[in-house]
Amino acid sequence: MSNTAASDDEVFKYFHDVKIDHDNIAHYRGLMAKKLLINRCDDCGNWIYPHRPLCPKCLSWNVIPTPVSGKGRLYMYTLIMQSRDPDMPLTEPIQAAAIELAEQPGLRYLSRVVNCPVEVLAHDMPVALTWIEENGRFWPVFQPTGKAHG
């Protein structure tokens, strides 16, 4: 993608199979540019995810999509063993992880942990944002920081 922000039409076309609305379109526009944007209240500083137009802490409508540092900890994860598509059986479990972002306690982003064997995953493990490409789109994922894994 270029350095210019994608138009709404470009975002809808790129994420044709995702429910995009007024509250989350900036998040998806950021993903197109490999930026993880989370809504933040510009009045009280509270981070808001899932994306909402109103700050639940101070009730301000002054909510701004803001880049996060990409640092966090593995809050929890699960392994999904059931394939969603009978024509594509799973060769390994699908991982779903909740990453607690460093910006605020309780601010959790759903993603995956990569570059780490499943048996090494651990609660509170430090992770950092990275990106993977799947089916022509970039997605935010996290990988362990610190000592080498795997």
Image: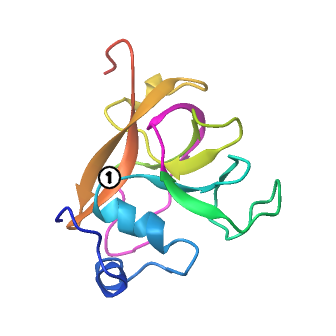
Query: Magenta segment range?
Result: 67-90
Label 1 sits on a secondary structure element that is: loop
Q: How many marks?
A: 1
Which residue is at the far left?
A: 2
Q: Quadrant of residue 9?
A: bottom left
Q: Is residue 43 left or right of residue 113?
A: right
- State the quadrant of the N terminus: bottom left
**Nearer to me, 16 or 54:** 54
Is the C terminus in the top left, top right, bottom left or bottom right quadrant? top left
> Up-down: is 2 above or below 97?
below
Q: Position of residue 38 (x, y in %)?
A: 54, 55
Q: Residue at x 29, y 47 (%)?
A: 131
Which residue: 37% across, 83% down? 8
Specify whether residue 93 is painted magenta: no
Query: Which residue: 74% across, 48% down?
Result: 44
Q: Report the residue at 39% width, 14% height from top.
A: 146
Image position, residue 122 (x, y; %): 55, 24
